[in-house]
Amino acid sequence: MTGTAMNVVAKRKPAKGQEGSFGDGVFDRELEHLPQELRWHEWMGRIEAVLFASASPVGREDLARVVGQGASVDMLIEDIAAELTGRPYEIACVADAWMMRTRTQFAEAIKAAADLGEQSLAFTEMEMGVLCAIAYHQPIDRAGLRDIFGKEVSRDLLARLRYEDLIASGPRSPRPGAPHTFVTTATFLATFDLQTLRDLPELELASHDAAEAHQPEQV
């Protein structure tokens, strides 16, 4: 952290209701009793602990609840990431949120030592095709999926993808009856190692996968 950034933080006053110190029953976000540098490192530790304990990406607003009002969550994340250089784990940005994860080059070592087995999700061709269609055409309803695949996509298949938290309900479709649409989730991005939907492969590749998933029978 730069000296200028720490000085800005130091000059901010705690908001009403946020005063207090450890042991008085009030969570102390501001840490006024600490020197500037120690305060910043304590905030870094808090954010790292939150990310470490969370199984899903944590957004900026949630992380801001554990640091002072004058602290930049983005700058804190940058400093934590810098300290993790060379470590077997890292902070990954997923859909404007952050999560802790081990670096990919250590995957085999982790499985060998911990006997974790195969933990990746197994998708059928049709499930992958539907995921692909939703990712590239969201928000899309069942009628839109039928137009792509030439047949109905079963509610059970969509329910499985929803159960895995890969898709969620989107805005109502402008079609008659205003049916629900489907969109992908932050879990989808994390599962496929994407930061945003802009990181999706070129559409031609996705179209090829969707075509391969086309089956003549009802799904």
Image (cartoon, rainbow, N blue to C red):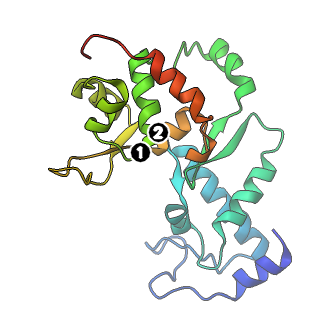
For residue 93, side relative to residue 139 (left or right): right
Instruction: Look at label 2 and name its amino acid.
Output: Ala
Q: Position of residue 29 (x, y in %)?
A: 56, 73
Rate crowding at label 1 as few (under 14), some (14 to 19) or many (20 or more) other CA atoms within 10 Å: some
Examine the rendered structure and indicate whether residue 73 appears above or below residue 111. below
Instruction: Look at label 1 and name its amino acid.
Output: Gln
Q: Are marks 2 and 1 in contact (CB under 8 Å)?
A: yes
For residue 131, side relative to residue 28 (left or right): left
* Residue at image location 77% in from the left, 77% down from the top: 6
Look at mark 2 in the image and give the residue it sits on: 135
Image quadrant assignment for residue 151: top left
Q: Position of residue 180 (x, y in %)?
A: 24, 47
Examine the rendered structure and indicate whether residue 190 appears above or below residue 111. below
Look at mark 1 in the image and give the residue it sits on: 138
For residue 163, side relative to residue 80 (left or right): left
Would you say residue 179 is visible in this rendering? Answer: yes
